[in-house]
Amino acid sequence: MKKIIVIGSGFGGLSAAIRLQANGFDVTILEKNAKVGGHAYQFKKKGYTFDMGPSLITAPDIIRSIYASAGKKMEDYLDLISLDPFYRIYFHDGSMIDYGPDANKMKMQMSQFNLKDAANYDKFISYTQKIHKIVIEDGMGAKPFMDMISMIKFIPKVLSLNAVNTGYNVVKKYFSDERNRFMFSFHPLFIGGNPFRSPAVYLMIPYLEKVGGVWFTKGGMYSLVKVLEKLFLDIGGTVKTRSEVTKIEVENSRTSGVFVGDEFYEADAVVSNAHFAHTYSDLIDEDQRKKWKDNKVKKMQYSMSCFLMYIGSKKQYPKLLHHTLILSERYKELVTDIFDRKILPDDFSMYLHAPTRTDPKMAPDGGESMYVLIPTPNLAANVNWKEMKKPYADKILKFLEEDFGLKDLRKNIEVLELFTPEDFASQRNNYLGSAWGVEPRLTQTATLRPHNRSEDIENLYLVGASTHPGAGVPGVMLTAEATVNTMLEDL
């Protein structure tokens, strides 16, 4: 059996490891932390349970296909809970909408903002369905793009749908009210993208949610991590935690394995689920890289970062749904500050995850487990987070309590943990503290992203947010499928 080493155990690494082990390879996952999970790690304190990264499941058929690749049924390992509505969105003027799958409910709510917008809802969904067909049904998301030739069959379809235009520009052709425009254009932010720059191909996400649903699991997203690990172990895979890979050994432009400190793990192929920039710049000597020299790695455009707050409150706040968005008055200007001006704005929009709405056991009786995410610039910005994190957290808590109306929040807090862009860099080896890796923009899409098969090192492969098709739980799982398809051809 050929030996495969997988570096890192995020959703990309676990998915690739399962598919490879199921195809007859001897696969070992090497994970730096005490438990598997990568960005989907879990944090517990004083009876409160927090998902530290991804907080929702879409496209369960992609997860189902991972189990099927190993001859198993997802339902034997995982119980999914459907969420409806998907999100509650609070706008700066006090208006709100519950965004969900029911077309009639959506049109009724949208009509309060703009009647013509409501009438265009079905047309927009029909448009997103066509993009979904290209990416998911026609296999663009699971197909590796190693050169422009591999893209030729898809280019006419993408051009015919104007999917190289920006997502926001396409959305505004259907909707006039800025609230409706936000609601259908914000999804690139969930994968580290700028809605005013990311290509409209990412507008498949609203359709993906509508037809596939938005889901959760009891015990939080880490439950999905655990059942994927169990599947991998059940089919004979090996997991070694507290085993941080410090070097990818390369001889004659080919990897022979990896080092964990002084210990060498021989391999016929290596799959890296580590951050793309960390993989090349930190784990491989520069003289072994022809394309991905350090300066080229640095010249790539990286996604934003975020400021995370994990809050355990003795008091519950029913105003919050499982997923809640609270928006600043500024949209494009705020996004520009974060992505391009690289400044920490005075205002902020935020995403709140309150899983206790669905699973009360994630907090003590009567308590609330909350995760607050505020988009911020990455470490290319001149922000001293060691000095800023406490006053910034105080500012957000003050807003939530006094402006948004979470009464007595501060005096009910039992747990408060903060995670900054600097933590993404130091704890997760993310270059510039970028939470999602390479930014999803037109010039960094498909074959223009780092490839699933290394261009520099033979039998080295990549999975995760920075390679094709990109970030988000479904996207990262599709990177694993695309990469494994390539490996099966090569090996």
Image (cartoon, rainbow, N blue to C red):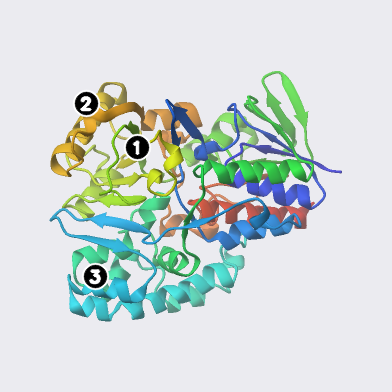
Q: What residue type is labelled 3?
A: Gln
User: Quick one: SS at disc 2?
Assistant: helix
The residues bearing labels 3 and 1 have C-alpha atoms spaced at a distance of: 31 Å
User: Quick one: SS at disc 3?
Assistant: helix
Query: Between disc 3 and disc 2, whose residue precedes?
Result: 3
The numbered disc on residue 391 is 2
* Left or right: 268 in relation to 99: right
Picture coordinates of residue 225, whole percent (x, y): 58, 43
Q: Locate residue 27: give its quadrant.
A: top right
Which mark's residue is nearer the viewer, 3 or 1?
Answer: 1
* Left or right: 387 in relation to 79: left
The numbered disc on residue 366 is 1
Picture coordinates of residue 430, whole percent (x, y): 47, 35
Which mark's residue is nearer the viewer, 2 or 1?
Answer: 1
Name the one closer to the observer, 159 or 111.
111
- Tag 3 and tag 2, C-beta contact below 8 Å: no
Query: Between disc 2 and disc 1, whose residue precedes?
Result: 1
Query: Between disc 3 and disc 1, whose residue precedes?
Result: 3
Picture coordinates of residue 173, whole percent (x, y): 27, 75
- Residue located beneath label 3 in the image: 109
Q: Locate residue 305: give its quadrant.
A: top left
Q: Which amino acid does label 2 sit on?
A: Pro
User: Quick one: SS at disc 1?
Assistant: loop
Q: Residue at 75% of width from left, 54% of height from top?
A: 70
Q: In the displayed structure, would residue 405 be above or below residue 333?
A: above
Q: Which amino acid does label 1 sit on?
A: Gly
- The 10 Å Cα crowd at callout 1, few under 14, some 14 to 19, many 20 or more, is few
Identify the residue at the far right of this view.
Answer: 1
Name the one closer to the observer, 249 or 325.
325
The residues bearing labels 2 and 1 have C-alpha atoms spaced at a distance of: 28 Å
The residues bearing labels 3 and 2 have C-alpha atoms spaced at a distance of: 37 Å
